[in-house]
Image: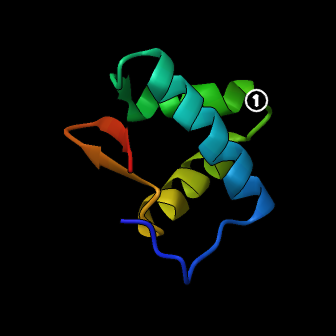
Amino acid sequence: MRNPETPLSELEREAFDHVERLVSSTAGDVTYGEAVSALEAREFRLNEARDVLEQLEMKGYIYVVDGVVRVT
């Protein structure tokens, strides 16, 4: 569940918007690795992509189950 007390930074918002579009366009079957690769294609460095996905998960915007990214 998204926490309104933890708004997204500009970088997190950009990443979330991209991941959300990616998940929507693939019927929800996006692996964590695919999400990282998609962010890398959007000029995120590898560690930056992983970090921002972790922040999105900690803030409740995404969750990962069995390696598959879900958007809340």
Q: Is residue 67 above or below residue 54?
A: above
In the picture, measured across the screen, residue 64 lies left or right of residue 33, that is: left
Q: Does 49 sit left or right of 14 as displayed?
A: left
Query: Where does label 1 land, which residue?
Result: 42
Q: Nearer the viewer, residue 22 or 33?
A: 22
Q: Residue at x 68, y 31 (%)?
A: 40
| Residue furthest front in the image | 4
Q: Position of residue 44 (x, y in %)?
A: 74, 40
Coordinates of residue 39 in the picture (x, y in percent): 65, 33
- Residue situated furthest bottom in the rendering: 5
User: From what the image shows, is residue 11 above or below residue 67?
Assistant: below
Give, as a three-letter code, the residue at label 1: Arg
Which residue is drawn at the image coordinates 36% and 18% (left, top)? Answer: 27
Q: Please state, as top left, top right, bottom left or bottom right, where the N terminus lies in the image.
A: bottom left
The local secondary structure at tag 1 comes to: loop
Q: Which residue reaches farthest left?
A: 66
Above or below 33: residue 55: below
